[in-house]
Amino acid sequence: MSDMTSSTAAGTADRAAASGRYTGADLTTGDLVPTPAQTIGPFYGFALEYEHGNELVPVGSARAVRLHGTVTDGAGTPVPDALLEIWQADESGAIPDVEGSLLRDGFTFTGFGREGTDGSGNFTLSTVDPGPTQPGSAPFISLCVFARGLLNRLFTRIYLPEDEAALAADPLLSQLPADRRKTLIATREEDGSLRFDVRLQGDDETVFLKFPRNDDF
């Protein structure tokens, strides 16, 4: 470390100490510690949204299906700054393995989409109906939710409503009471759209999943 760098780091550390702020690091030695988990902030609007991120397929194309809904908190109030990510198979049930999940060339289906809620907590994505990944299995879309007040993201699923036999036999859904199972099944609207509301807490709270390898979630 040069004398100038050492002097600057030491000065920064001195000012932090004088102000009573905990820096979590010894800036004079370069000994840094990991940044702790934090709630979502307005920086997501700058750093994570990208052009056509919510369009897995172009809006208005023959295969496009609108997936939309509202994110609400425990009091039923819309959450205006949530961020949602989806991963899914294509219409045939094939899981995309193309490079670049952010690719939007109008031809390649990556299976990944990202969308922030608007001021009323609403979100909309343009995607396709996923096919079953195995014969007889229930088609679903994986959903990840980030929102204010959450120290870590939440995982859930969006099941298509049509194949009732497959839904009844699904290993996850079959473990849930009927009133909880319905929180994971989308509603098909008259125009073919899928509606799926996310309730973070309270009555009809959406069932969220915990994965063994993510013990901190």
Image: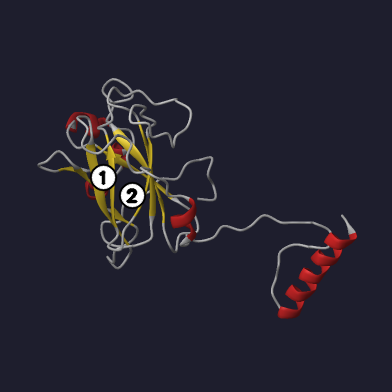
Residue located at (46% from left, 62% from top): 42
Q: Is residue 116 above or below residue 202?
A: above
Residue located at (47% from left, 32% from top): 100
Specify the quadrant of the image occupied by residue 11.
Answer: bottom right
> In the depicted view, which residue is nearer to us: 197 or 55?
55
> In the depicted view, which residue is nearer to us: 11 or 146?
11
Q: Secondary structure at mark 1?
A: helix
Residue located at (83% from left, 63% from top): 28
**Residue found farthest to the right:** 3
Q: CA distance from mark 2 to mark 1?
A: 8 Å
Quick check: marks 2 and 1 in contact, CB under 8 Å? Answer: yes
Image position, residue 135 (x, y; %): 28, 20
Residue located at (54% from left, 60% from top): 38
Question: Label 1 sits on what residue type?
Answer: Arg
**Is the N terminus in the top left, top right, bottom left or bottom right quadrant?**
bottom right
Q: Earlier in the sequence, mark 2 or mark 1?
A: 1
Would you name the residue on which mark 1 appears?
181
Image position, residue 75 (x, y; %): 30, 68
Q: Is residue 15 above or below residue 125?
A: below
Residue 3 visible to the viewer: yes
Image position, residue 112 (x, y; %): 39, 37
Specify the quadrant of the image occupied by residue 32.
Answer: bottom right
Would you name the residue on which mark 2 appears?
207
- Graded by Cα atoms within 10 Å as few (under 14), some (14 to 19) or many (20 or more), the crowding at tag 1 reads some
> In the depicted view, which residue is nearer to us: 165 or 47?
47
